[in-house]
Amino acid sequence: MDKLNDLFVRYLLGKNGNENMLEDMVNAALSDFNFEEVKDLEIIDPYNLSENIDLKESIIDIKAKTKDNQTVIIEIQLQGNQYFIRRSLYYWANSYSSLLNKSENYTKLSPVISINVLDFVLFNDIDDFHSCYLLKEIKHNKILTDHCMLHYIELPKFNLNNNGKEKLSSWIKFFKGENMSNLIKENNIFEEVEKRCQSFIDSDPLINAYRKKEWNEYFYKEELSEAIKEREFSMAKSMKKENIDIELIKKITGLTIDEIKKL
């Protein structure tokens, strides 16, 4: 089963009764940078099958609050580019501004922790699979506030030689499809995770919705791939008419020499 399927992740981490798993995953990210762990997470807008079954976007949006009023956002994004940085900032800002009603005192504002799990590479100039950003003064490296914290976990960068702490590494391996028996040896929370996975599979409405989502995602990717290929052929045709060197056409479009010659 694809552990990054949005329907599944919402069920696993965003459902009432699963707060211990969400808390473990959040604290795995926080402890990787030696931040203080959170306790007693309460899920906001908990998972509901009828609201999620026809969800089109491949993005997870799980929100929770701690007893001391910190907000935690979990997002899992399957594809994207540099504009995701702005998107994640927007979601953080939206969550932060929503903490305060009009005319309320600013003292009521509290930290918002954004954790973004990405199935693509966002920062090409950083080798680490987990990076964290805070608001700082540049010259003195002084943190302005702990109210703004953005974590980015880039799954494609992860391998067994990474230096992430074991608890976070276990969660990354889970999302990448590691055998559950191996994960249970590393972190006993996965005994509970395994039970939830099985209950998901055993539920006809859930597994049918999962399959529908997977098929829709597959056909979307196929259609997107065909559209990109058509655009490449169209570009190559235009460049051939302009007598542009075939090696340059290959470099620009990604087509093979044989494909270009047949146009």
Image: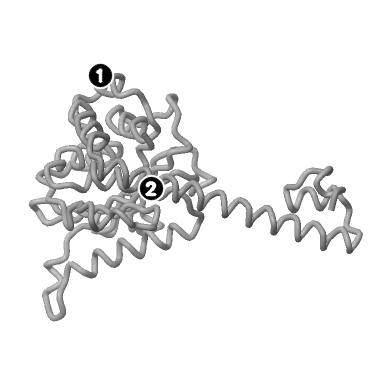
Seen at 36% across and 59% down, the residue is 137
- Secondary element under disc 2, as helix, strand or loop, is helix
Q: To which residue does mark 1 refer?
A: 185
User: Which mark is drawn over residue 33?
Assistant: none
**Label 1: which secondary element:** helix
Q: Nearer the viewer, residue 1 or 177?
A: 1
Point 57% across, 54% down: residue = 224
Cα gap from disc 1 to disc 2, whole angstroms: 33 Å
In the rendered structure, the answer to whether residue 172 lies left or right of residue 48 reads right
Q: Residue 245: horizontal and vertical position, in percent?
A: 89, 53
- Where is residue 73 drawn, in percent x and y? 26, 53
Determine which quarter of the picture holds residue 138. Answer: bottom left
Q: Position of residue 195 (x, y in %)?
A: 19, 30
Looking at the picture, which amino acid does disc 2 mark?
Lys
Please determine whether, in this image, residue 128 is positioned above or below residue 184: below
What residue sits right under mark 2 in the picture?
212
Left or right of 191 on screen, residue 226: right
Of marks 1 and 2, the one in the foreground: 2
**Precedes in sequence: disc 1 or disc 2:** 1
